Image (cartoon, helix red, strand yellow):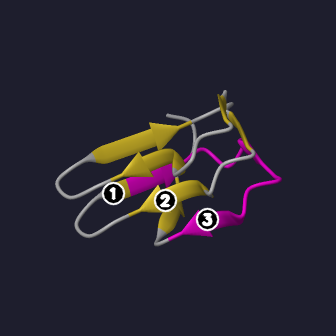
Amino acid sequence: MAASNSHQGIAADNNGTVRASNHTVSLNLNGLTQNGSGVFESRGNNTVRGNTTETSGTITTFGPV
């Protein structure tokens, strides 16, 4: 759970990679954030609700292996 943060709930910044699955992201300024050259991949099963901005940047999906 990423909740009640004054900025991002979960963020991928320059040169970073995030792969998120089964997370609850709520009450943040930004829920899921991709910045610059960061890579943000979501399994598609995250609950992202009640943030000022739900997603920012490019959030791609990935499936099970």
Image disc number at residue 39: 1
Q: Secondary structure at mark 2?
A: strand
Question: Residue 59: x percent and y percent?
Answer: 51, 63
Taking the spot 68% from the left edge, 38% from the top edge, the residue there is 4
Q: Earlier in the sequence, mark 1 or mark 3?
A: 1
User: Magenta segment, which residues?
Assistant: 40-56
The alpha-carbon separation of the residues under discs 2 and 1 comes to 10 Å
Queried whether the magenta region covers residue 53, the answer comes back as yes
Q: Is residue 35 left or right of residue 59?
A: left
Q: Mark 1: give few (<14), some (14-19) or many (20+) Cα within 10 Å.
A: many
Taking the spot 26% from the left edge, 70% from the top edge, the residue there is 36
Going by the numbered disc 2, the residue's amino acid type is Thr
Question: Residue 15: x percent and y percent?
Answer: 17, 54
Going by the numbered disc 3, the residue's amino acid type is Thr
Q: Secondary structure at mark 3?
A: strand
Q: Nearer the viewer, mark 1 or mark 3?
A: 3
Q: Earlier in the sequence, mark 2 or mark 1?
A: 2
Q: Which residue is identified by label 2?
A: 33
Count every numbered label the image shows and give the total: 3
Q: Residue furthest right?
A: 50
The alpha-carbon separation of the residues under discs 1 and 3 comes to 13 Å
Vertical comparison of 38 with 6: above or below: below
Taking the spot 46% from the left edge, 71% from the top edge, the residue there is 58
Question: Residue 39: x percent and y percent?
Answer: 33, 57
The quarter of the picture where residue 47 lies is: top right
Marks 2,3: beta carbons within 8 A: yes
Question: Residue 38: x percent and y percent?
Answer: 28, 59
Question: For the N terminus, which image quadrant?
Answer: top right
Vertical comparison of 40 with 57: above or below: above
Image disc number at residue 55: 3
Q: Mark 2: give few (<14), some (14-19) or many (20+) Cα within 10 Å.
A: many
